[in-house]
Image (cartoon, helix red, strand yellow):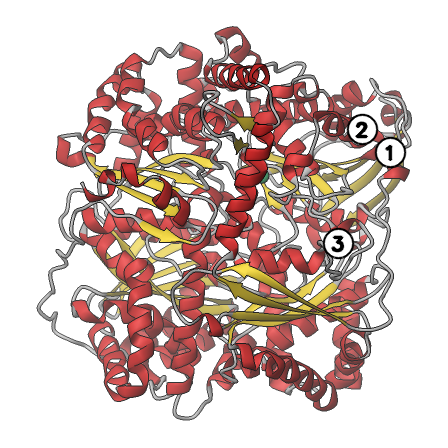
Amino acid sequence: MLLRSVTRSSSNASTSLFFRLFPRSYFSRSSPATGRNIRRLSAAGTGSELFLRRGLRLLPAAASGCLSGQFSLAVSTQTATSYPGQDEAEKLGFEKSREEFISECKSKAVLFRHKKTGCEVMSVSNDDENKVFGVVFRTPPKDSTGIPHILEHSVLCGSRKYPLKEPFVELLKGSLYTFLNAFTYPDRTCYPVASTNTKDFYNLVDVYLDAVFFPKCVDDVHTFQQEGWHYELNHPSEDISYKGVVFNEMKGVYSQPDNILGRITQQAKHRFTALCPENTYGVDSGGDPKDIPKLTFDKFKEFHRQYYHPSNARIWFYGDDDPVQRLKVLSEYLDMFDASPARDSSKVEPQKLFSGPRRIVEKYPAGGDGDLKKKHMVCLNWLLSEKPLDLQTQLALGFLDHLMLGTPASPLRKILLESGLGEALVNSGVEDELLQPQFSVGLKGVSDDKVQKVEELIMSTLRKLADEGFDTDAVEASMNTIEFSMRENNTGSSPRGLSLMLQSIGKWIYDMDPFEPLKYEEPLKTLKARIAEEGSKAVFSPLIEKFILNNPHCVTIEMQPDLEKASQEEVEEKNILQKVKASMTDEELAELARATEELRLKQETPDSPEALKCVPSLNLRDIPKKPTYVPTEVGDINGVKVLRHDLFTNDILYTEVVFDMGSLRHALLPLVPLFCQSLLEMGTQDMSFVQLNQLIGRKTGGITVYPFTSSVWGSDVPCSKIIVRGKSMVGRAEDLFNLMNCVLQEVRFTDKQRFKQFISQSRAGMENRLRGSGQGIAAARMDAMLNAAGWMSEQMNGLSYIEFLHTLEQKVDQDWEGISSSLEEIRTSLLSKNGCIVNMTADGKSLTSTEKFVGKFLDSLPEKPSSGQVTWDARLPLRNEAIVIPTQVNYVGKAGNIYSSGYKLDGSSYVISKHIGNTWLWDRVRVSGGAYGGFCDFDSHSGVFSFLSYRDPNLLKTLDIYDGTGDFLRCLDVDEDTLTKAVIGTIGDVDSYQLPDAKGYSSLLRHLLNVTDEERQIRREEILSTSLKDFKEFAEAVDSVREGLQWPWHHKKTLMQQTKNAQIFSK
Ligand SMILES: [Zn+2]
């Protein structure tokens, strides 16, 4: 749901799309620094993901992001650049293995082989300016000590040519990258970068190549200790504890029941035998916190030596840069190596299929709230085949997945949720990114006596679907949804070239054809023809029979809540650490305390200016002086304001209709998210919600409805809107507006049973967020104390909302009439021609041709004289708060409004807060504090400056670090080079790459928040002229936060152990 979380989604903001695309197979280095400091108005990754939430996953490895038909914004049939001829490639040490023109992405793709090492290179050329490079190694682990994951973190901590502490962070600070990250999958590790600036792009490529092949971490045990794990002992008299970035990251992962379930599914843990007990998928490449401390530095080094070798690497280039240059850069590195047998030793062996089903019961740590009997989870999992599937079958399975589970109307999803047996689905769908595909489906929030029933219902529904087949309308809706998403190729905020790379690698990594996953047109045509000729049942029923019903390799996993487990695990950890301490002599303890101190000193010593200069960076000259303008024409249709953006969208119309929430009664606010869901999922007088959903699927690319709130700079009145977003082919614009009208005006709020499901799903979702994104909950809470927009947002998406859902759940049976009429009241209050704004993005001709449908839509809206505006001046009481949840990690926040201290908005604040996040907080909270992230956020609209930490083992120490920020700024001495990097990095954030729909949407949000192009120009100039003086002056503004609020988010043990510090909570 898009509340005002435009950038607030914290540390994984930039990777959120990938989490959705690839929900459980990998970890990413989502650093706090990639959580932008700037409140960037971007639709990408927030709004657009609301469309086709599962649609993006429906063709998992096959075709989730390819181009189709004539669609081409950034690519053309001709590549301008010359291609290396056979001779030229030969001279550079490569031989051309294959060459093809891929019409789906209008690209010329050439596969090269480096002759000396056997390294394979895929060189894809087109005229997409968003260039992508990636190097991928096959890294199957043999145990759950997390070697691949720790190595992924560590290689980015300094290398031969770039011998500083963290070149990765230096790049984050001073590059125009559009993507910069690294991922660990269960069997591979990927290092992708992207930029639209060619010079910047090759800088990034060189740093990454040097990092993976010549990292310092294999000679430096300190990096291993910092990123992996180490014993920390501050004084011989104190207790020993574990520290390490990955160690804490994984403790956070293992604190979420859904994650634990996912991990158990893959793994053979202890006495359990899960889906893949015999191959590499049976262990956790990310690392189990219990096993991470078993990893030794020698094993770590050996893993790098063995697998990070060109013979075991696959390299990807994509975009409009010179293909000869690519090979030149690579040959410099690859020629330094001889061939190694790594490619054979890294082969992933398949798991043999079982002869019969298995069952596993496992406990997970649960909190004390709610009825524990109703907190069971049950999930059925199938390993679909011993060998990888062909593209045709894979595509058909993707379709089947969407048909069964893709939308709220899909039968398997609908029947499970309507059964009342559980609250929400868990881990459901086809997963086909690894060597062997699997299918899972399950429920959470299940009563202990209903577990069996859930299993029976899943099996009987699958049986029924195989026997009866699917509704024709449903098949058509899935077909349209899938084709639309292929044609649109909307990869959100991530580069298209990256999405193609990840698809190609899905086969290539197993020594299969890297071209095949890029070419979906033929298999899709074949599948459509088969469905047309034989009927959908003939296509899908055999798949259900073969891969699910008659497949003996089925593992049922039941997860039981355990109140004691979290504290037991802590006691176990403590016991181990006590034993470790008891086994050490006094000399050894003194030595450990000395080593702890040595590591800390090293971490806190900044790199020398000479070392910092090694990292290549751009000049201010390379930076455009003007911001990117989005063509915007403000006019009106039938008296309603209409914003038009003339942009090439390949025949797709994107539109937003905005209604004002200003006259809504306060008490109704927390009902708004469920109101929005009801509009799309409750049905009308004539149509069941299933029919309505299918109609939307058949005719459009999707419709979403969500609230949007934000403070407005220089105004006391918050912006509070409901946004209805839709997209369709231009030729279907009339259908789109008719359906939007139907959703808004004809939906009836009469289905109590469905409404009850919405409540329990929302509650389950929010509870998951509570554990996994405590920093987001904390930020929302602090905002709610500081301004009205924050208060509104918290009512709809924070702790207050969770409390509201609990009450509502009780109320729904007693007073459904009352709730139903409240929903109706929200509609009446919102729906009005007055104050409505329409936003449209498409090419000029299409904008004109669709005007009449907009006019008809607007005329059908009721006209209301502007009613008395309710003033939104509500706040939560200003106080320090603490909340206890069953997790192994903490989240600590502190915030204040710096405008009230007299600070005047200046563009330099963006540069400064980014710098604080990338240096002071990164070094102290993450590197030496051992948290997964520490960052700050400045909301220039409200003036709220907040500090937040993520998966933090500390509490009070982190708060001290926040408080020290003012002094850090006062003592700061930055040279010209550092300052330039900080400025360029900030411009990189401001100018983030956007696809056309995101451009149009950003422009709408700027309009709503009164951000003019003139003001953007002023801020840009302020950013570009930021000086050291600005940093010093900002210190005072930050000092005002010190006196402000803090909000520690922590687990039970901390509260019990640290009662002596309890005064901070009651301040
Ligand atoms: Zn990580």
Amino acid at pointer 1: Ala
Amino acid at pointer 3 = Leu
Q: How many angstroms separate mark 2 from mark 1 (CA)?
A: 7 Å
Residue at point 50%, 8% (across, down): 608
Disc 2 target residue: 309
Q: Judging from the image, what secondary structure is the residue with disc 3 in? A: loop
Across and down, in percent, residue 264 comes to 66, 58
Residue at the spot 22% in from the left edge and 55% down from the top edge: 791
The answer, for residue 664, to whether it is visible in the render is no
Residue 713 at x, y percent in the picture: 20, 43
Observer-nearest residue: 847 or 546?
A: 546
* Lower position in the chain sequence, tag 2 or tag 1: 2
| 192 relative to 409 in the view: left or right | right
* Image spot of residue 931 (x, y percent): 47, 35
Q: Name the residue under label 3.
A: 434
Task: Provide the residue designation for mark 1.
Answer: 342
| Type of amino acid under label 2 | His
Say which of 455 and 212 sits in front: 455
Element class at badge 1: helix
Mark 1 burial class by Cα count in 10 Å: few <14, some 14-19, many 20+: some
Side of 263 relative to 697 (left or right): right
Mark 2 close to ligand 1, CB under 8 Å: no
Mark 1 or mark 3: whose residue is earlier in sequence: 1
Q: How far apart are marks 1 and 3 (CA)?
A: 20 Å
Determine the residue located farthest toward the top in the rendered image. Answer: 610
